[in-house]
Amino acid sequence: MQLKNRPAVTKTVEITINPVETKLIAYIKGADKLRLNREDSYSLVTDNGYINNEEVTFKIQEDPRAKKPPSDYATLIQALDDNGKTIPNKYILHANAKNKLGSVVLIATYQGKEYIKTVDIIPLW
């Protein structure tokens, strides 16, 4: 910078611009409750939309309140297209047909971060 009336007076200013750290805002899209022997699809969705990426993985885990393993309440499989190929970032959660009510914790992992959703298994009526 320089003074207008006194060009001999100058000052050097150093400006450092740090990159902006962007945070991924994401959630698991799908039903919060599943009726016995029913299913729904689940995907990880971000503020930029659907992630069409094979990096997204899902798993189910026992709800801390549950007294049985998650496989007693529901099963999780990756969705398939009409040709039998897996669809990235789309999983099917199927509730049991054994009258076992409870909940499972659905965990999606993407870029080293976990996103969690609890799904309750409820009666048909």
Image (tube, helix red, strand yellow):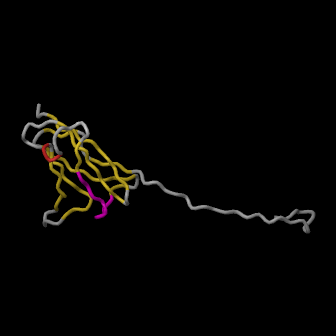
Which quadrant of the view contains residue 16? Answer: bottom right
Who's the residue at 37% across and 53% down the image? 46
Residue 77, image x, y percentages: 17, 55
Who's the residue at 18% across and 49% down the image? 93
Indicate whether 116 appears above or below 110. Answer: above
> Over which residues does the magenta segment extend?
51-59
Give the farthest residue toward the top.
125
Residue 83, image x, y percentages: 13, 67
32 displayed left or right of 45: left
Give the farthest residue toward the front.
67
Q: Quick one: quadrant of the N terminus?
A: bottom right
Numbered disc total:
0
Give the farthest residue toward the left.
98
Q: Main secondary structure of the magenta part?
A: loop
Residue 91, image x, y percentages: 21, 54
99 displayed left or right of 10: left
Residue 125, image x, y percentages: 11, 31
Which quadrant of the view contains residue 5? Answer: bottom right
Who's the residue at 57% across and 61% down the image? 19
Residue 66, magenta (yes or no)? no
